[in-house]
Amino acid sequence: MTDTEKIHLLLVDDEEKFLNALTERLKLKFFDITPVTNGEDAIAVAQKARFDVAVVDLQMPGINGVALLRTLKQSHRFLEVIILSGHATIDIAVECTKLGAFKVLEKPCGFDNLVEAIREAYESRLKKKFENDARRIKKIQSLAFGQSPLGILRELSKMDDNEK
Amino acid sequence: MKQHPIDLVNKQGLRFFGSVNASISHELKNIFAIISETAGFLNDLTQLSKQGKPFDLSLLENCSNSIAEEIERGFDTIRRMNQFAHSVDDPFRETSVSETLTLAVKLTCFLSFAKKTHLEESARDARVFTSPFLLQTLVYRTLIALYRAMDNKDELTPAFRDPDHSGVTLVFSHRLAAGLKDFPDPRTTEVAEALQAAFKVTDTGLELTVPRSNDALAAALAGG
């Protein structure tokens, strides 16, 4: 599997040993992992690199999992976020789902369950991206009719702004 | 209306026990999660070995060290849980301020919003006659209020001094954040009143003075 085919995963947990062990195991499953120990670093790396899925611990010092979920979903519309919680109540699950979390898993969730959730999240991301791309192509095709070249450029610029 | 100390222990005690148990169970879950993933990784390495694929042998050493460290962390957590559970053994007795403070710091450090806390080594202990459980509750609640008011990079240095025979003063020195102005909250005030303890905010931090003895509390708890 080449680097471009790998699922790019952002892993956020303040438990450094858990983060390291999980990173090593996921690497063996051919994921491309970026591990970080806090929300601030997660936001910073997500601005520099593209990620398919983020796995985020709920309870962290500083920016907690809910705040990080909110920020990541606002800035990266196709990024799927899986929340890991030491105490996954229905209220937390509802709140995270409302904010756009793909799944809320209770720690320890079992490695195979986590891998399965990441794959499902990746598929969901691809589906949303393809649907969005199809809409864009359709819109670009419609622009080509009856617009001046400058008008087409303006519309394309607006579409790009909406992608951010 | 002022609450009877027994009611206070029952009402606040349940809440406090629940809160501490929740944070301890969260810590234990984290420990199990690390052991589980590390053991899983060892299994992955075994599978690689069976397939004849090479890997760095230092990974095995790292894994076994990590598991051993987490087991020790688990034992330490259970020791604290046990110490905390025994704080209700006697409703009123001579209590070590040093041990109470140390245990409260160790119990609060499981909380995600806890800040770095340095306990000053003291050559001698200070002891008071009080309800060990209510004192534990009060110190714990005070630490939580301070952590919530502090900036993420702030550090706390709690200590105690016993300037005279009337009481012992716990000093939580740090640069006070604005959030502490609402402290003590009503629940903390209830506990402080039962213990006849007093808070004082100074330029450098928060002071909590506990009397050496508390006959009213002793009588109330004995009569309850």
Image: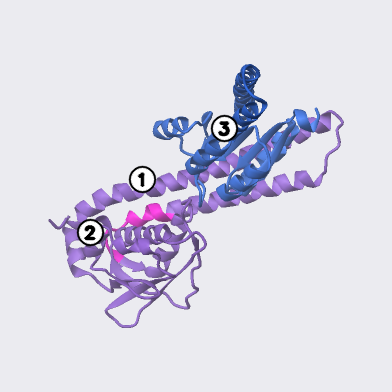
Q: Are marks 2 and 1 in contact (CB under 8 Å)?
A: no
Question: Residue sitting at 22 percent across and 54 percent down?
Answer: B8
| CA distance for labels 2 and 1 | 18 Å
- Disc 3 to disc 1, C-alpha distance: 47 Å
Residue B139: percent from the left, percent from the top?
Answer: 36, 62
Sequence-earlier tag: 2 or 1: 1
Q: Tell me the SS state at disc 2.
A: helix
Q: Colour of chain B?
A: purple
- The residues tagged by marks 3 and 2 sit, at their Cα atoms, a distance apart of 55 Å
Task: Reply yes or no: does residue B92 show up in magenta.
Answer: yes
Q: Can you give x and y, in whole percent of width and height, for residue A134 in the image?
A: 63, 18
Q: Chain of mark 2?
A: B
Q: Chain of mark 1?
A: B
Q: Secondary structure at mark 3?
A: helix
Give the residue type that dot 2 points to. Glu
Under mark 3, the amino acid is Asn
**Mark 1 sits on what residue?**
B18
User: Please, is residue B114 above or below residue A72 in the view?
Assistant: below
Does any portion of residue B103 appear in the rendered image? yes
The reply to whether residue B139 is visible in this rendering is no
**Letter of the blue chain:** A
Q: Residue A162's mark?
A: 3
Q: Is residue A68 above or below residue B216?
A: above
Quadrant in the picture for the N terminus of chain B: bottom left
Circle number at residue B190: 2
**Amino acid of disc 1:** Gly
Q: Is residue A132 magenta?
A: no
Q: Residues within 10 Å of mark 1 (few under 14, many from 20)?
A: few
Which mark is drawn over residue B81?
Answer: none
Magenta segment range? B83-93
